[in-house]
Amino acid sequence: MKMAIFGLARSGMSALKHQSSQGRYECYAVNRGTPKSWESYEQICKLIDPANCVDEEEAVDLMGEMDLIVKSPGIAYTHPALVKARANKVEIISEIEYAYRHSDIPVVAVTGTNGKTTTATMINELLEMLGKKVFLGGNIGIPYSEVLLSYESYDWAVIEVSSFQLENIKSFKPRLAILTNISPSHGERYDSHELYRDAKLKLFQNMNEDDTAIVPRSFYSLNLPCNKKSIKALDQFDFSKSKLVGEHNKENLYCAYVCAQEIIEDKELVDSTVQKYIDNFGGVEYRIQFIRSTPTLDIYNDGKSTNMASTLAAVDSFEDRKLHLILGGKLRDRTMDFSELVNRDIESVYAFGDSKDFVREKLNGHFSVSTHSTMEELFEALKSDELDGVLLFSPAFPSFDLFKNYEHRAKRFNELAKEL
């Protein structure tokens, strides 16, 4: 039997490492470019026959001969090699489906347009405080398949899942599943918001009456095959010592609280641990993360934001402060809606990158808007501006105009902010 790993980023490499040790399939690696140009080519050649490394442009017929394809989430379903494979009835699955088939660890899965990383992190940290051994992975940065390569024994796997990963699940079934929200996103991948929404909702398709879904109020009427709980703000605890910023984070924490209640029998222990967690919460990296203060300015990094809904949530977290907002990135959709942002109380806007002129076009007349080609140029302007209040980096656009990914962009912001 033959299996192809299509896409050799982190998740593909983890699946390849695992399968090459199993011996059930003859493994092929398919990736963009000539194999010798691949970043992990030497490592791959230690796992499989180098003759089984194939440029994706030359793999169309080969993919039609496979018994199974594990597809990277970044590869569109319309790729010619996948079209050929589907025509030949080849089974195509995502890496999270592959990992689930080979693991017996119960799963908490988190998806949503915004808030999924924060929520998954909160669940992981809370369960660990309650004495559980937890694997945290998926879209958050550590491939789910890494759990198959670990010698650790885990009680639970908390997996952040994207719509791209959910497109190709077959049996993936969480014990607890959270949908934080759905707002328009990934217009470059989906022809309509409905297709994006449907991909997200595949998360619940294999669940049953023993499982629990935690969903926004607007989705509570969905006919799901499991128990449902509606998301609300967690406000029965004392937040006076907390660094938690924003009402939406109280909703993310509510999801973590419900998961803990479902998993831990001792409810008093859960409540006391949640209060301790609130008191000591330090924030999630690049999600409204406090970076530093100058004598007049508090600086926050919400660099994970790549859409307007996320930026609006961040802006609303500072509604009682004088706010200076940094936007910018790759312009992918000229229909992007700024109507809600213009109703917010914002002192000034700094725009940079590919979308800078678009931002000025949409916001000029509502706010003071300055535009800059690069983030470095923007910070040079900040050095001469005497700002007070809050400086919030919540870009609302993808990062790949000037950076490799959002993490690269957010890290660079921190570097520059520490020099301000």
Image (tube, rainbow, N blue to C red):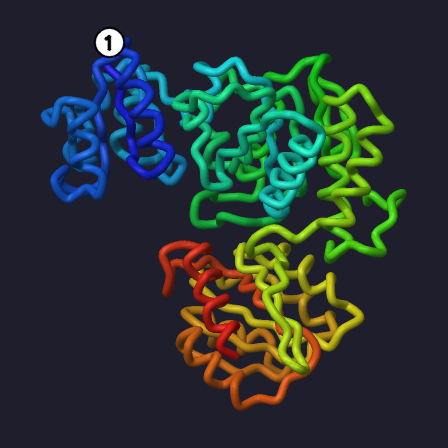
Q: Is residue 86 visible?
A: no
Depth check: 310 or 236 in front?
236
Relative to 54, residue 337 above or below: below
Image position of 311 (left or right of 144): right
Q: Give the vertical position of 330 relative to 47 (above or below).
A: below
Tell me if 279 is positioned left or right of 60 in this view: right
Tell me residue 2's x, y (percent). 23, 14
Relative vertical location of residue 412 with respect to residue 101 in this rendering, above or below: below
Q: Is residue 372 left or right of residue 247?
A: left
What is the count of numbered marks?
Answer: 1
Expressed as whole percent of the image width and height from the top left, the position of residue 292 reads 61, 69
Residue at 61% over, 59% down: 289
Q: Residues within 10 Å of mark 1 (few under 14, many from 20)?
A: few
Amino acid at dot 1: Met
Q: Residue at x 77, y 68 (%)?
A: 319
Q: Image point 78% across, 36% down: which residue?
A: 273
- Image quarter where the N terminus lies is top left
Picture residue at 42% right of the left edge, 76% below the top: 376
Which x, y percent locates residue 387? Answer: 64, 84
The answer to whether 89 is drawn above or below residue 292 in the figure is: above
Query: Front-most of 95 and 364?
Result: 95
The image quarter in which residue 349 lies: bottom right
Image quadrant where residue 35 sits: top left
Direction from residue 175 to residue 30 in the image, left or right: left
Whether residue 80 is visible: yes
Secondary-structure class at tag 1:
loop
Kindly identify which residue carries mark 1: 1
Percent across and percent down for residue 322 are: 73, 77
